């Protein structure tokens, strides 16, 4: 299941990025919900919030090590755990989605632009969303496991 989820994330991520690349010019901003949600054509040569700009070799190495670790965890721990499989699939798909951009485009295509309680959140993409949701699920799984361990 994890690999199917990862594949779906990668496909949706790459198709949405391709649409942005083909249909929008860099910096173009389309209002979806005024003062809340926009589609903005943006590029990022770094990590979250633009950190580590231009450090592509670093990102290649870190992502490859990360992907190998996630695949190991899927094989070792997630085969009979549906929630863990979903979370690791989201994390894997997100990591590979952004890796594809870095490898082929030398930058990550971002386009989801939101304002949360007036805060102009950095522009992100589907891969970033999948990574964040997957990590939150992993955190919840860890809390549930700890709680179960305390009861036993």
Image (cartoon, rainbow, N blue to C red):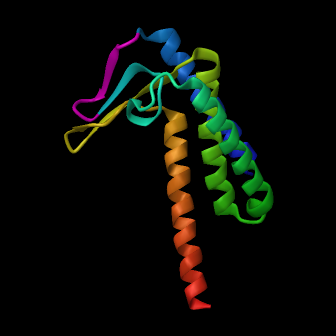
Indicate whether residue 103 is drawn in magenta. no
How many labels sit on residues?
0
Would residue 12 be seen by someone viewing this image from the given angle?
A: no
Q: Quadrant of residue 24?
A: top left
Q: Quadrant of residue 51?
A: top left
Q: Quadrant of residue 28?
A: top left
The residue at the point 74 percent across, 45 percent down is 68
- Residue 54: x, y in percent? 49, 21
Q: Is residue 102 above or below residue 65?
A: above
**Which residues are the magenta region?**
26-36
Q: Is 106 in front, or is 101? A: 106
The residue at the point 54 percent across, 24 percent down is 16
Q: Is residue 54 above or below residue 115?
A: above
Extreme residue in the left direction: 118
The residue at the point 65 percent across, 52 percent down is 88
- Residue 73: x, y in percent? 73, 56
The residue at the point 64 percent across, 21 percent down is 103
Indicate whether residue 29 is drawn in magenta. yes
Extreme residue in the bottom direction: 152
- Residue 85: x, y in percent? 69, 56
Q: Quadrant of the C terminus?
A: bottom right
Would residue 87 be seen by someone viewing this image from the given angle?
A: yes
- Residue 142: x, y in percent? 56, 69
């Amino acid at each position: 299941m994890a690999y199917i989820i990862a594949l779906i994330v990668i496909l949706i991520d790459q198709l949405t990025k391709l649409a942005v690349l083909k249909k929008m010019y860099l910096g173009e901003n389309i209002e979806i919900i005024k003062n809340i949600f926009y589609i903005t054509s943006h590029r990022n040569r770094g990590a979250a919030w633009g950190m580590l700009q231009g450090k592509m070799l670093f990102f290649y190495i870190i992502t490859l090590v990360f992907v190998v670790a996630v695949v190991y965890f899927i094989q070792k721990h997630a085969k009979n755990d549906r929630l863990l499989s979903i979370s690791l699939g989201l994390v894997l798909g997100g990591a590979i989605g952004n890796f594809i951009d870095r490898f082929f485009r030398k930058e990550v295509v971002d386009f989801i632009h939101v304002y949360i309680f007036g805060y102009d959140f950095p522009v992100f993409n589907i891969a970033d969303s999948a990574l964040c949701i997957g990590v939150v699920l992993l955190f919840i799984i860890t809390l549930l496991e700890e709680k179960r361990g305390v009861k036993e």
